[in-house]
Structures are given as structure tokens and as C-alpha cells.
Image (cartoon, rainbow, N blue to C red):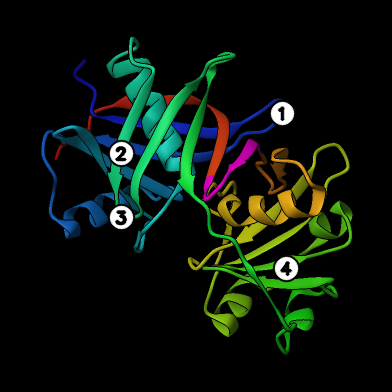
Amino acid sequence: MNDNYFHVDAFIGVGLRGNPAGVCLLKQPLETAQMQAIANELHLPETSFVWNDGDMQAIRWFTPTREVDLCGHATLAAAHVLLNVVDAGLKEIRFRSASGELQVKRDVADGERLILDFPSRPPQKIDEPAQLAALLGVQPQEVWQAKAMMVVLANEAQVKALQPDIPALIDHFGCGIIVTAPGDNVDFVSRYFSLDRCEDPVTGSAHCTLLPYWTACLGRHELHARQISSRGGELFCELHGERSLLGGYAQIFLRGNINL
């Protein structure tokens, strides 16, 4: 297997295109500046860089402009390549990351679906910040804060209809903004406006905050979610104590070589 680069769509579903991620397989780690330059050149929402690190695979994630400490869809993309192209006999992968050890397993009931084992980021309820309703263009029902701010709306239609000035929203609050509501055909839906001042198509890490909240609301630990961006994505979620299990599908769009 000579290819060292894969473009993978992660958290896809029927009629849903998921979130594109680059996966760069390295023989050894590159300098941070070089990884950032490659991610900028590829200009995908995130690019993961993966290399063998003894008993695990090391992984780092970069947007076109910055490194991030946790990325669900680019981890799913990397695991899809490792488990289906590099060694199809493997059933799980362990990653060493900035957010600790992350594990990805094949779903025992559906070998095509992969399950990410991520740290949960439960939110704390806060008072509604000034200007939030004006900048979003809708009145929140509740506001919660973890690493990102989570805004709860009444229904899926309100989430779908949002058309905020995303740069103004992010510049004002200085953190990512998750917007969520009960789903019409799934347990909950969401959208995510990122620190890169744009909407992220599907955000695995945001579900580490969404899942603890909706588990408490609905009284169930296994939930079905959709992120209703223009591309759309599907996640099969299960809360296990302080860990969020995020299941999803991925497919390779293209593969080739990058001159490193």
C-alpha cells in the first residue's frame, strides 16, 4: 500500500454527505508548521496526521488555520483507513492524542459502522448571555456551557432555519456555538458554528457535550442524532459514564500521494 493520503467523508448516512476529512499516513511525525501547511493546502474542515507510536497510533488534527485538541470526524476517517485499507483484519485502533487515549472499534452488529470512544464534555447551565438571541436570530430556551456554548431551541425547524452572521457570532462570544433541539425523526438534531468562523458539517466532538445533556433529558443512554448542516450527518450515540461512544459510517472519496 503506497498511498499516503486519503480524502474520507465521515458520519455519512442515507442522503447525507457527512464531513470531509484528510488522512495523512506518516512514517514519522512532521514538524507542526509542516502539518499546518499541508492542512492549509488541502483546505478541508480537518486533516488528521497519523503515525505508528509504539503500542498505539499517534494522531493530530489541523484545520486550515489551527491545530485542534479533539476531532471526531477526522478520527473516524483515520480509523476507517486503518481498519479497511491498512489492515482489514483489525477490529480496533487505539490513538494517542492531545485528549488522551482514544479508541475506535468495529460495531459487532454492523462491521461497516465504527464506534469512537471519546471523553465526555458535559455542559453546565448558565444564564443567557447578552446579545445571544439577537446574534442568533431566535430566542433560546436554555443555554449551557462546556468548551463550546450549547444553545437549546424548541424544535428542529428553528435549528434548520438559523441564518446567523457566523463571524460576528463567534467574534462576540469567543467560543464554538452548538445549537440543538429535539428531532422530528431522530432523538435530537444540532448545528455547530466553529472557531474557524464557519459552520462545520458534522462535529463529533460537539456530541461529547450534546450526548450527556440529551441523555439526562430523555432518560435513555442510546440516542440517534443528526447534524442538519447543508451536507448533513448521522451519529449513533451511547453514554458510558464519563465516555461518549459515537458511532458512524465513512467512505473514501479519493486516495493518492502527497509529496512530504
Cα gap from disc 3 to disc 2, whole angstroms: 10 Å
Cα gap from disc 4 to disc 3, whole angstroms: 26 Å
Cα gap from disc 4 to disc 1, whole angstroms: 26 Å
First reached walking from the N terminus: tag 4 or tag 1: 1
Cα gap from disc 2 to disc 1, whole angstroms: 30 Å
x then y, percent, for residue 82 = 32, 24
| Screen quadrant of the N terminus | top left
Whether residues under marks 4 and 1 lie with C-beta atoms below 8 angstroms apart, the answer is no
Q: Which residue is mark 1?
A: 15
Labels in figure, total: 4
Residue kind at label 4, given as amino acid type = Val
Residue kind at label 1, given as amino acid type = Gly
Residue kind at label 3, given as amino acid type = Ala
Which residue shows up at 44% across the image and 49% down it? Answer: 71
Q: Which residue is mark 4?
A: 151
Q: On the image, which quarter does residue 77 sit in?
A: top left
Left-right relation of 97 to 63: left
| Screen quadrant of the C terminus | top left
Q: Which mark is residue 98?
A: 3
Q: Which mark is residue 95?
A: 2
Residue 127 versus residue 168: which sits nearer the camera? 127
x then y, percent, for residue 136 = 75, 74
Q: Which mark is residue 144?
A: none
Label 3 packing within 10 angstroms: few (<14), some (14-19), many (20+): some
Of helix, strand and loop, which one carries label 2? Answer: strand
Whether residues under marks 2 and 4 lie with C-beta atoms below 8 angstroms apart, the answer is no
Q: On the image, which quarter does residue 98 sit in?
A: bottom left
**Looking at the picture, does residue 247 appear above or below residue 239?**
above
